[in-house]
Image (tube, rainbow, N blue to C red):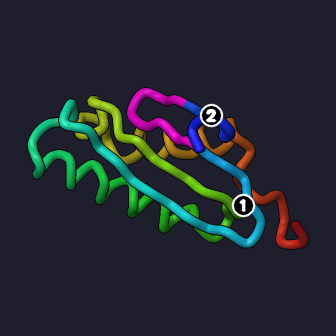
Amino acid sequence: MYRKGKDAHSDSVVLFFLPANEIHKVGFTATKKIGNAVKRNRAKRRLRALFREFSPTLKDGTYIFVAKQSINEVTHQKLKNDFQKILNRLNTIKKEPND
């Protein structure tokens, strides 16, 4: 997955993406570098919430989101901008409904 797919990095999130037809898988991870279990769970909750927001517009494939250390310090708007930036960089957003 990691070798075959593409990856994009931002200040607070890393995305690994592997395109695939008819598959819509997603994973969220936060390492111990983020902090204790409370901080790691909060980071993953924030990523899940953003993924739900963008999910209807995303192409099929496998998505793995990795939280970076700064994720719990950034504002919601900054995190959303980072999230959108990495999705755009990997060209994972569908163009139009006919796509």
- Residue 13 is inside the magenta segment: yes
Which residue occupies the foreground of this view, 74 or 35?
A: 35
Pick the front one: 20 or 91: 20
Q: Residue at x 87, y 66 (%)?
A: 99
Q: Residue 49 lies in what quarter of the image?
A: bottom left
Residue at image point 44% right, 57% down: 27
Provide the secondary structure element on which disc 1 rests.
loop
Farthest right residue in view? 98
Which of disc 1 and disc 2 is earlier in sequence? 2
Q: Is residue 41 left or right of residue 89?
A: left
* Rendered view: 20 above or below 71: below
Residue 28 is left or right of residue 52, and the answer is left
Q: Position of residue 19 (x, y in %)?
A: 72, 53
Residue pictured at 34% horizontal, 48% vertical: 29
Q: Which residues are magenta?
A: 9-16
Camera-side residue: 58 or 22? 22
Which residue has dot 1 on it? 59
- Count every numbered label the image shows and give the total: 2
Prevalent SS, magenta region: strand
Residue 11 lies, with reference to residue 31, above or below; the image says above
Give me the C-alpha separation between circle 2 and circle 1. Answer: 20 Å
Tell me the SS state at disc 2. loop
Circle 1: residue type? Lys
Q: Position of residue 87 (x, y in %)?
A: 62, 45
**Is 70 left, or right, of 87 in this rendering?**
left
Determine the residue positioned at 66% across, 49% down: 18
In the rendered image, residue 3, in percent from the top left (x then y), is placed at: 62, 34
The numbered disc on residue 3 is 2
